[in-house]
Amino acid sequence: MWQEKLRTDTLQHMKLSVIIPVYNEASTLGALLERVLAVPLDKEVVIVDDGSDQATKNLLETAAGNKNVTLITHSENQGKGAAICTALNHVQGDAIIIQDADLEYYPEDYPTLIEKFMVSNAQAVYGVRDLSERSFLMKWGNHAMTFATNILFGSRLHDMETCYKLIDRQLMQSLQLNSRGFEIEGEITSKLLSMGIDIKEAPIRYEHRKEGKKLTPWDGIPTLLALLKTRFNGFSPPNPQTEN
């Protein structure tokens, strides 16, 4: 009984900013947004249309009518990282989570991550997936990037590439991100670790999508370069807690 009360009290004292980069996701976007908006949390949803097709734009125009949704548009496709960087200029919540526009991740897991975030007094919590259903190459690529991260930064992460990175908003905005593509995951993680941030982890559900994937094993190369750049160039923002 006390555990449930702790969970309820914890979730009531936090506003979540959900960033959703969107590029040609008409087949899944409607169901995804419905699930995100249904999660019983104080939240804002910031969607970046990254140069999508007309079918996706039509769905986004409808979604923009919701008072909790902010829609920002890129005139042409710039990449997931660019969409996240754009969204970071508009978020106002206590913490941020990135949500892919497909249906691989479960928005219903937000409360689990937030509870870990608050109870552990954390600044960053990563959702750890079960990757057993992924193809050998994609699974190997994920493990390789996580292994490289742990070797380079002395960390003990289990899923560096996870989309579900719940991070304090001020901290996230202090990272001075500039990646344009999927290497944004490596840039975020390497900069957090360079700052000495203790990244907590929590298990999340994951349903691998076999069709329409934009991420390929080749995306591991720019991700590795992003890790190496931070590791050997260093990163230390003037004051990560400064209000924006």
Image (tube, rainbow, N blue to C red):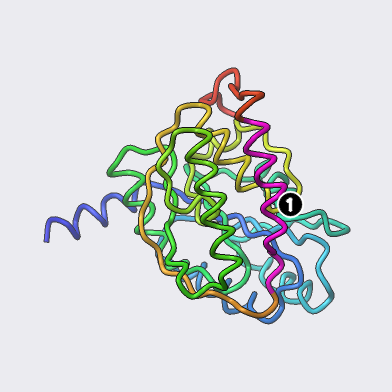
Q: Is residue 116 magenta?
A: no
Q: Assign the magenta stretch its main secondary structure.
A: helix
Which one is nearer the viewer's eye here, 146 or 113? 146
Residue 29 pos. (x, y %): 64, 75
Which quadrant would the C terminus be assigned to in this image? top right
Residue 104 pos. (x, y %): 54, 72
Vertical position of residue 41 compared to residue 52: above or below: above
Which quadrant would the N terminus be assigned to in this image? bottom left
Vertical position of residue 124 compared to residue 164: above or below: above
Which one is nearer the viewer's eye here, 38 or 102? 102
Q: Is residue 30 left or right of residue 11?
A: right
Q: Is residue 102 left or right of residue 2?
A: right
| Mark 1 surroundings: few (<14), some (14-19) or many (≥20) residues within 10 A | some
Q: Is residue 229 magenta?
A: yes
Q: Which of the 4 image quarters holds residue 102? A: bottom right
Q: Is residue 132 left or right of residue 112?
A: right
State the extent of the magenta-drawn residues as a range.
213-230
Residue 101 pos. (x, y %): 63, 68
Which one is nearer the viewer's eye here, 180 or 62? 180
Residue that label 1 marks: 181
The residue depicted at 49 percent of the width and 43 percent of the height is 167
Q: Which of the 4 image quarters holds residue 119? A: top left
Q: Is residue 160 left or right of residue 49?
A: left
Badge 1 amino acid: Gly
Vertical position of residue 120 compared to residue 237: above or below: below
Q: How many marks?
A: 1
Which one is nearer the viewer's eye here, 26 or 186? 186
Find numbered disc 1 in the image and state the secondary structure of the residue it sits on: loop
Residue 82 pos. (x, y %): 75, 48
The residue depicted at 59 percent of the width and 76 percent of the height is 209
